[in-house]
């Protein structure tokens, strides 16, 4: 009986732990704003509760109870808890492999477009319905919004799916993590060299550590 109760308790505990929900009422990567550090291009550092908004992968922080958006033209990197983010092409991407100027980054965005899709008769697109939904879609986390008001209503809204994409980043270049994206930046001679290079480097295109080896070729 004791073993049965212990097993039942563990099962209930496991069921109580659920993956984070993303929604229009709480469109953030983290379930709450987390203490972090922002480092600007000029080296200036400041600490604030931080989060990543999943509409445009913007960096948000709380200042005197108000949610504000960092101007990414000024931001180099941000540390949120144990996670490090880099400003890559005007979007905050999580570094998942590497360091310095060469790294693999993950971009996480909400699939808000899916909320705006409708279907009409015989599977045709319901354009009018989608337009109305786009207009009425209320996405929280707009700059200068009261944090406590948003926090109290965080369980509302419509559920949003999260879409992750990996990128290989080198000085001056950003490559989506697939062979076609890399080859599109190469001339004919480089494509031939890349084909030969791949024969001795078995790249796993969904594995950050494997993708990091691409920087060996891309930096040549």
Image (tube, rainbow, N blue to C red):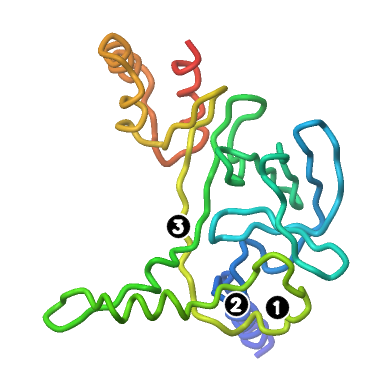
Mark 2 vs 1: CB contact within 8 A: yes
Badge count: 3
Left or right relative to 151: residue 111: left
Q: Residue at x 76, y 52 (%)?
A: 81
Q: Quadrant of residue 153?
A: bottom right
Q: In the image, residue 63 lies at what x, y percent? A: 84, 62
What residue is shown with label 1? 150
Marked residue nearer the N-terminal end (2 or 1): 2
Near mark 1 (Cα within 10 A), the count class, few <14, some 14-19 or many ≥20, is some
Q: Residue at x 33, y 16 (%)?
A: 194
Q: Residue at x 55, y 82 (%)?
A: 157
**Looking at the image, residue 37 lies above or below residue 99:** below
Please name which of the two marks, 3 or 1, marks the residue nearer to the observer: 1
Q: In the image, residue 136 lies at what x, y percent? A: 47, 81
**Looking at the image, residue 180 lies above or below residue 114:** above
Marked residue nearer the N-terminal end (2 or 3): 2
Query: What is the spatial separation of the Cα atoms under label 2 and label 3, in whole angstroms?
Result: 18 Å
Marked residue nearer the N-terminal end (3 or 1): 1
Residue at the left extreme of this rendering? 122
Q: Quadrant of residue 191?
A: top left
Query: What is the spatial separation of the Cα atoms under label 2 and label 1, in whole angstroms?
Result: 7 Å
Near mark 2 (Cα within 10 A), the count class, few <14, some 14-19 or many ≥20, is many
Query: What is the spatial separation of the Cα atoms under label 3 and label 1, in whole angstroms?
Result: 23 Å
Residue at the bottom extreme of this rendering? 1
Q: Quadrant of residue 76?
A: top right
Question: In the structure shown, which secondary structural element does the residue marked by tag 3 occupy?
Answer: strand
What residue is shown with label 2? 25
What residue is shown with label 3? 163
**Looking at the image, residue 31 lies above or below residue 193:** below
Question: In the structure shown, which secondary structural element does the residue marked by tag 2 occupy?
Answer: loop
Q: In the image, residue 134 lies at what x, y percent? A: 42, 74
């Amino acid at each position: 009986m004791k073993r049965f109760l212990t097993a039942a308790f563990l099962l209930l505990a496991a069921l109580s732990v659920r993956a984070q929900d993303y929604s229009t009422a709480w469109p953030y990567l983290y379930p709450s704003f987390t203490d972090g550090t922002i480092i600007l291009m000029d080296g200036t550092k400041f600490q604030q509760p931080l989060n990543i908004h999943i509409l445009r992968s913007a960096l948000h922080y709380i200042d005197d109870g108000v949610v504000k958006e960092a101007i990414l033209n000024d931001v180099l990197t941000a540390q949120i808890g144990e996670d490090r983010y880099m400003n890559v092409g005007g979007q905050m991407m999580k570094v998942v492999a590497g360091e310095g100027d060469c790294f693999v980054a993950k971009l996480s965005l909400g699939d808000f477009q899916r909320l705006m899709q409708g279907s009409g008769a015989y599977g045709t697109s319901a354009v009018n319905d989608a337009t109305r939904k786009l207009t009425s879609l209320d996405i929280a986390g707009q700059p200068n919004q009261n944090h406590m008001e948003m926090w109290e209503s965080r369980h509302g809204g419509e559920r949003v799916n999260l879409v992750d994409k990996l990128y290989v980043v080198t000085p001056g270049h950003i490559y989506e993590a697939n062979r076609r994206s890399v080859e599109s930046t190469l001339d004919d001679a480089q494509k031939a060299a890349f084909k030969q290079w791949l024969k001795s480097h078995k790249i796993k295109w969904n594995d950050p550590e494997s993708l990091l080896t691409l920087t060996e070729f891309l930096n040549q």
